[in-house]
Image (cartoon, rainbow, N blue to C red):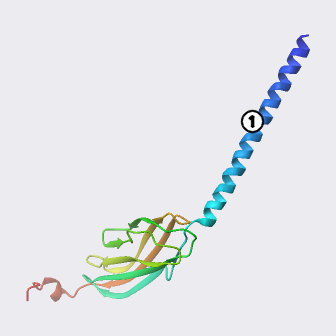
Amino acid sequence: MKKVFLGIVAVVMISGLNFSCNLISAKETTSTADSLAAAENAPKIEFEEESFDFGKLKEGDIVEHKFAFKNVGKSPLQILNVQVQCGCTVASKPETPVGVGQKDTIVVRFNSTGKVGVNKKFVTIHSNAVPPQTVISFTAEVTAKPAAEATKPENQ
């Protein structure tokens, strides 16, 4: 009697485990299918250029460049945040969603004060696109101000 009871308990436990594994597998399959469908219909950001070279600058120059992009996805693109690498760089983003097939720009401004030498800076764009992060960059070679210019008052 004891062996029959233990056999029934074992069968019930194994059946329960098998059933719960099937539920987990079904959830994973549904989740994966939902993720793939969402990715297919998501916005997608495509930049005309992902890097730009300002060339040679004189220390103190402030330059800017517009990185043009297009939403080549299937739903509106929202730029959530734009992160710059240091305080010498400022970036502005569109405040309104970019429709399917529409173009817009990320404006990046670089202040070369105190940045003598070759500079390579990165700007990370966070959006609702797939993938959710895109990195653009720029380079600039900054030459030092001549000593006479550095000490000259700005009013003269």
Q: Which image quarter is the C terminus in?
A: bottom left
Q: Compared with residue 147, is residue 137 higher up or lower down, i.e. above or below? A: above
Residue located beneath label 1 in the image: 20
Q: Compared with residue 57, is residue 79 higher up or lower down, i.e. above or below? A: above
Judged from this view, the residue extending furthest toward the left is 156
In the drawing, does residue 123 fall left or right of residue 1?
left
Q: Residue at x 80, y 26 (%)?
A: 13
Between 55 and 46, the one nearer to me in the picture = 46
Q: Name which residue type carries label 1.
A: Ser
Which element carries disc 1, helix, strand or loop? helix
Determine crowd level at label 1: few under 14, some 14-19, many 20+ residues with C-alpha closer than 10 A.
few
In the drawing, does residue 80 fall left or right of residue 40?
left
Give residue 86's position: percent from left, percent from top. 34, 68
In the drawing, does residue 9 fall left or right of residue 91?
right
Give residue 57's position: percent from left, percent from top. 31, 87
Res. 41 image quadrant: bottom right
Give residue 120's position: percent from left, percent from top. 41, 77
Give residue 55's position: percent from left, percent from top. 38, 88
Judged from this view, the residue extending furthest toward the top is 1
Q: Residue at x 26, y 77 (%)?
A: 113
